[in-house]
């Protein structure tokens, strides 16, 4: 996260089901390891799409690529 500087990190698929158990440990580790700038500007989110989140994301990229090639 210190290298790529994302605005958000989205945790999805099956792991998102465990948000209640892993959110606090993730926040604690990030607070210890991130620079001050990144602590303020990076958000951790949990997907609400369930087990299909990866498939939906891949399909979204494929559809966007198709429309871009068709100049639509």
Image (cartoon, helix red, strand yellow):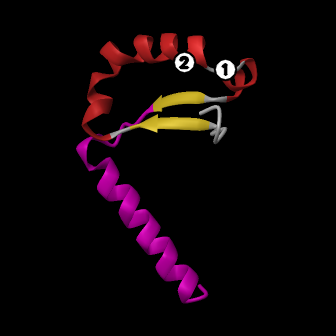
Secondary structure character of the magenta stretch overall: helix
- Asked whether, in this view, residue 24 is left or right of residue 31, the answer is left
Q: Is residue 43 left or right of residue 41?
A: left
Residue furthest to the bottom: 70
Q: Residues within 10 Å of mark 1 (few under 14, many from 20)?
A: some
Which residue position is annotated with label 2?
Answer: 30
Q: Is residue 53 above or below residue 72?
A: above
Secondary structure, mark 2, is helix
Q: Are marks 1 and 2 in contact (CB under 8 Å)?
A: yes
Q: Residues within 10 Å of mark 2 (few under 14, many from 20)?
A: some
Residue 25 vertical placement versus 8 (above, below):
above
Q: Residue at x 32, y 31 (%)?
A: 16
For the point 34% across and 57% down, the residue is 56
16 above or below 23?
below
Tell me which numbered mark, 1 or 2, is placed earlier along the sequence: 2
Does the magenta portion include 54? yes
Q: Which residue is mark 1?
A: 39
Q: Quadrant of the N terminus?
A: top right
Q: To which quarter of the image does residue 30 belong? A: top right
Q: Can you say which quadrant of the picture contains the C terminus?
A: bottom right
Q: Secondary structure at mark 1?
A: helix
First to last magenta residue range: 46-72
Q: Position of residue 63 (x, y in %)?
A: 44, 73
| Residue 52 at x, y percent in the picture | 26, 50
Task: Give the image location of residue 45, x and y in percent.
Answer: 48, 31
Residue 27 horizontal/vertical position (percent): 50, 15
Q: Tell me, for residue 23, which label it has, or none.
A: none
């Amino acid at each position: 996260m210190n290298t790529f500087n994302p605005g958000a990190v989205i945790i999805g698929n099956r792991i998102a089901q465990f948000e209640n158990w892993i959110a606090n440990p993730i926040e604690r580790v990030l607070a210890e390891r991130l620079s001050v700038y990144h602590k303020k500007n990076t958000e951790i989110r949990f997907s609400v799409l369930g087990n299909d989140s990866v498939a939906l994301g891949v399909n979204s990229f494929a559809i966007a690529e198709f429309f871009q090639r068709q100049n639509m």
